[in-house]
Image (tube, rainbow, N blue to C red):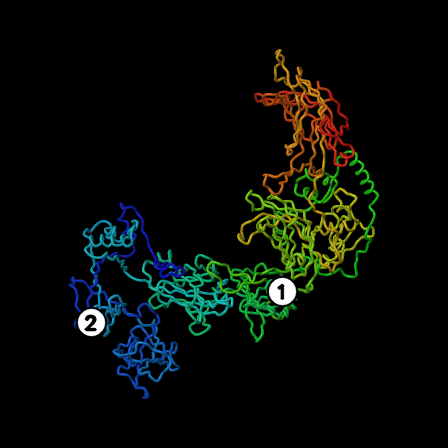
Amino acid sequence: QYPQDKTKDVKMPVELRVNIWLGLSAVEKKFNSFAEGTFSVFAEMVCTSLLSYFRFGCELLYLPWTCSLLTEADAGHTEFIDEVYENESHYPGGEWKAAEESYTDVNGEKAPPPREFTCPLGWMWEDDAWKSDLNRAVDEHGWEYGITIPPDAKPKSWVAAEKMYHTHRRRRLVRKRKRDLAQAVTAGRGISSYEDQEGWEYASLIGWKFHWKQRSSDTFRRRRWRRKMAPSETHGAAAIFKLEGALGADTSVDDGEGKSSDKTKESATKVFGANTPLVSCYFDRVYTYHLRCYVYQARNLMALDKDSFSDPYAHVSFLHQSKTTEIIHSTLNPTWDQTLIFNEIEIYGHPQTVAQNPPNVVIELFDSDQVGKDEFLGRSVCSPMVKLIPEEDITPKLLWYPVINNGKASGDILFAAELILRDKGGANLPILPSQRAPKLYMVPQGIRPVVQLTAVEILAWGLRNMKNYQLAPVMSPSLIVECGGERVESVVIRNLKKTPNFPSSVLFMKVLLPKEELYSPSLVIKVIDHRPFGRKPIVGQCTIDLLESFRCDPYTTKEDIAPQLKVSLLSAAPRQDTIIEMEDTQPLLAAQRFYLLIKDFFYLLFFKEEEIVDWWSKFYASVGEHEKCGQYIKKGYDTLKVYDCELEKVPEFNSLTDFCDTFKLYRGKSEDNDDPSVVGEFKGSFKIYALPDDPTIPAPPRQFRELPDSGPQECIVRIYIVRALQLQPQDNNGLCDPYIKISVSKKVIEDRDNYVPNTLNPIFGRMYELSCFLPQEKDLKISVYDYDTLTRDEKVGETIIDLENRFLSRYGSHCGIPQQYCISGVNTWRDQLKPTQLLQNVARFKGYAPPVLSENGRKINYGGRDYTLEEAEANKILHQHLGPGEEQLALHILRTQGLVPEHVETRTLYSTFQPNISQGKLQMWVDVFPKSLGPPGPPFNITPRKAKKYILRVIVWNTKDVLLDEKSITGEEMSDIYVKGWMPGSEENKQKTDVHYRSLDGEGNFNWRFVFPFDYLPAEQLCIVSKKEHFWSLDKTELRIPPKLIIQIWDNDKFSLDDYLGFVELDLHKTIIPAKVPEKCNIDMIPEYKADSSQKAPRTASLFEQKSMKGWWPCYVEKDGSRILAGKVEMTLEVVNEKEAEERPAGKGRDEPNMNPKLDLP
């Protein structure tokens, strides 16, 4: 890292190899055996001197210190460029002549002429002669021009263009040399060449950069002195431990700027009398290695150019050496196929240690830019394979390594490296790979992937949702597909808005692809817009990595797999020569009719409760809530499939992309923390299969054939919204008021008036119908909003459905097929085609012979197998709504073909502000009907069930054996009895009788009527209660509770609170059957309490079935943890609907109309 500049976090200035020994201080001696080299401690001091009166002064030196000289500039390099500048001058208007100092270095200091340069020992010239360097800001001959400004005798700045006032010019002459591996390089040559020098380095001013050769402008010089230190004891731990506290960094907290570092320097100076000693590790010998890096390809790199691509190259570093691959232009998936060779690498340490922990190879990828510096793409680290025996028959394997940029994945690189221990002459090294260009080695055979000739078929269906490029819409695009160095281009779409599909949909190309899937290159899709004046900008691109999912066996027949043609069941009308010919309607068989008559008779006999069968009965029966579905299941009606996810996420339906997939298109340079922007979608698919090596063998058959019409289709879309689950709260009360908003292209349906107040689990029960053109209006967006009166409505979440995928899918997802073919009732057939017609289409798409129907219509031969009507009707209850038998049988066959059944899908809602967090779920389904096939069947009625008005009439006649809670003046026990009653949820409508005063035996007479109106759902057997939670609430909150009646007996007190005596709670669906006489009324009649466990459970009955009940019910009270009888109440319970209440009116208490029955004073 760069501590001074936090913005340079993407750079890696150095990689450290560290060998750490951790042990107790008691075992310090073991460090000596652990260390490979010899540790030495040196004290250092730098001697400085200033130029005064034309001579340098110097501080006192401490002998016998030895000079530490620098090495040459070519140290550690295998290639080096020698340079010298040729200088000329003239007076304005004169001719150019050699300057006073004809040859200088870059700083203007005198240098030897090129002819006096000799090639050092161990080097050889690579260039035949000196050449002018033209790769600089110079003219065509390599000259640059300048002018002297007094008092300087030499120009300080140079320009490439010559002017009349220029007096000096110079050009750079270069000559390249390289290491001669055949010559032995003597050690210590760098020192011997400086034996006549004193180890000084010079600078023009204090604080400037030092150089080793003295110049005339230098005023400051320095040299370093080192002195080896020996431990005072001959035995014991390593000397390095004696320096504890001086070598390591100060770990104390830095409470001020610079205080910690000053303290460390002060302590080190106090201990040693000088600066901190330097610890060096010396090895007996150094081993030379040979490294080969195999850079094959990369994929999914970042786009850093405006044309959506990059010009990547790889910079490979290993220890102190580095090399660079060639630049691949305009691609995010470059294939270099290049071997980088590092000839001589000196590594200290035993080879076995290096083999166990080799240094890392660092691969840094950059985007080459013609203007400005290259941009960083990412970095990857690889550990090389170490071969201590070069002849060993093992080869490295190419692997994908992730490319990381600023902590984020930025692609992958296919790379391998091997580190080989070489001898002195390098004779044991493997032969060099073949060259693709001078000094550009390819990845050798055995390491590079093995390829085979492969066919790639592209179904280029069309483009969707293309965004503007450079403020202009994309109008005339074409498609380019690249893979493995090959490319193919589609025809141009003339008008994208009118016809977004390609006129010719199938493309084909032959590619050499690796046999092993690991090495498969990426498949690149580019979209080019054809604009005026010949401009063809790239407006979007996509990279597909995994090609395995597109591989297929071209010789597999249609009978062996699912429908190969992958076209919608709706894409083609049935053929004219139809084999199945039958009447549209056929009467039921006599046995079936007799069965239905018997069934209806028993139903009317045993089920007197009002029957409600609607679509919600079907839904609740399908989700297992049988208490809400009434008699739906017993009648033998079919159910539907409720998926807990989106239909496209159901595994057996292959994401509904069996005909074509949807690929996101990206464009342009991405920001540091942002994902690349999606600029459109490509609809298409691929088929990849191997081609025979022998050209005489016929090619396999093409895979994309008999495609549906790619023209626009006008469709009717029905959207059924059932309910929402677990919505995110939007209001302060922790609830929301949701409603539905639907949009397709520019068509919007906003159902704001039908919002559901105060709920997180609303039941919508809405069906919306609209028409659209596919594929132009393919995206159906369904949003849930929160209704607000004063502020703007907030979006809870949304979900998007691709209507085109559902229309084209071979799974029949446009309209799920039910379990039964019904011509009436709640399950009426709603598809445009009958089951027999659908079966013909499926047979044709699979390549089967047309289905053949028997004469009696009870058997169909399909796919070489006979299906019978008895098989279809097995274990099923027949009812009066069923259609003809041949349609039932065809539907039975269709349900074995893997088609989408009649269903409800559960879609997750997402918000643009929190794209990955669920905002709730929506249960719904969509039907898509093309108008070309005629009108569809009637839609389902999924309107929520509406409660009906019912009235519960309770007549309290008498009480008996009521607890006596008071004492009279004479001391006798007595009670002033009255009865109170209400239904839970309607506490504000509590009613009570008049008071029966001074009952001495617990008997009371009332003849009093309670009237409780309530809203009731017969199918769900629940009461609907709507009330405001607060006074200031705008809407009522709806609750669903079981219908119950609570009766309480009280003792009236004039001067204190009334005393509670007992109660009974009656469930109107499981009402306790009352006793006819009070003597048989006891506490054992209460279901929750039985005095004797051996007794049978009390009998109950539904008041809605009985309509009316009269008798005695026990009341009880809790006392000392047990229930005791508190009294008996004689009542008449009666449930009437709104119509019956109007026909037989009755008032509260004994008020008018006092009838049905008339109540007299007791």
Q: Secondary structure at mark 2?
A: loop
Task: Name the kind of residue labelled 2 in the image.
Answer: Asp
Residue 182 percent location from the top left of the image? 33, 72
Q: Which mark is residue 196?
A: 2
Q: Quadrant of residue 665?
A: bottom right
Label 2 or label 1, whichever comes before in sequence order: 2
Taking 24 as reference, is 643 left or right?
A: right
Q: Secondary structure at mark 1?
A: strand
**Dot 2 alpha-carbon crowd within 10 angstroms: few under 14, some 14 to 19, many 20 or more:** few
Q: Nearer the viewer, residue 941 or 696?
A: 941
Q: Quadrant of residue 158?
A: bottom left
**Dot 1 alpha-carbon crowd within 10 angstroms: few under 14, some 14 to 19, many 20 or more:** many
Residue 194 percent location from the top left of the image? 23, 70
Q: Would you place residue 967 above or below residue 454 in this image? A: above
Q: Nearer the viewer, residue 712 or 342?
A: 712
User: Which image quarter holds the C terminus?
Assistant: top right
* Distance of label 2 from label 1 (alpha carbons): 79 Å
Q: Would you place residue 615 above or below residue 711 in this image? A: above
User: Which image quarter holds the N terminus?
Assistant: bottom left
Q: Quadrant of residue 144?
A: bottom left
Q: Which mark is residue 462?
A: 1
Residue 560 visible in the snapshot: no
Q: Nearer the viewer, mark 2 or mark 1?
A: 1
Residue 193 visible in the snapshot: yes
Task: Name the kind of residue labelled 1 in the image.
Answer: Gly
